[in-house]
Amino acid sequence: MQGITPDFQKRQMPAASLIIAASVAATGLLVTLVSNAMGNRKATSTPPSNTPAPAAPPTATPKPAA
């Protein structure tokens, strides 16, 4: 890196900034897509933990023999 002049470094800064910005945007998009995919998979297999348990179905009472 000793051969890189300050002038060359200044000229490379805009390109480096664009590469970093594109990388951050792509990473954010990938995280969002994976998060949504995992969220959709989780929602179909198990209910969220904050939902109340379903009520027990009513039981039929036997009629008294007359």
Image: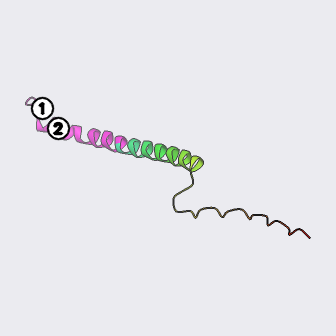
From the image, which quarter does the N terminus lie in?
Answer: top left
Q: Label 2 neighbourhood size at 10 Å, few (<14), some (14-19), many (20+)?
A: few
Residue 44 relative to residue 57: left or right: left
Q: Residue at x 38, y 42 (%)?
A: 27
Judging by the rendered image, the residue that carries numbered circle 2 is: 9
Q: Amino acid at mark 2?
A: Gln
Query: Does the magenta stretch mainly form a helix, a strand or a loop?
Result: helix
Element on which disc 2 rests: helix
Judging by the rendered image, the residue that carries numbered circle 1 is: 4
Residue 7 % position (x, y): 14, 38
Residue 4 relative to residue 13: left or right: left
Instruction: From the viewer's side, name the closer residue of 26 and 51.
Output: 51
Q: Residue furthest left?
A: 2
| 50 vs 4: above or below | below
Q: Label 1 neighbourhood size at 10 Å, few (<14), some (14-19), many (20+)?
A: few
Q: Residue furthest top?
A: 3
Residue 15 % position (x, y): 28, 38
Number of callouts = 2
Instruction: From the viewer's side, name the closer residue of 30 and 3.
Output: 30
Q: Residue at x 37, y 41 (%)?
A: 22
Residue 19 relative to residue 40: left or right: left
Q: Amino acid at mark 1?
A: Ile
Mark 2 vs 1: CB contact within 8 A: yes
- Earlier along the polypeptide chain: callout 2 or callout 1? 1
Segment tinted magenta in the rendering = 1-23
Q: Quadrant of residue 11?
A: top left
| 58 vs 5: above or below | below
Element on which disc 1 rests: loop
* Cα–Cα gap, marks 2 and 1: 7 Å
Q: Is residue 57 magenta?
A: no
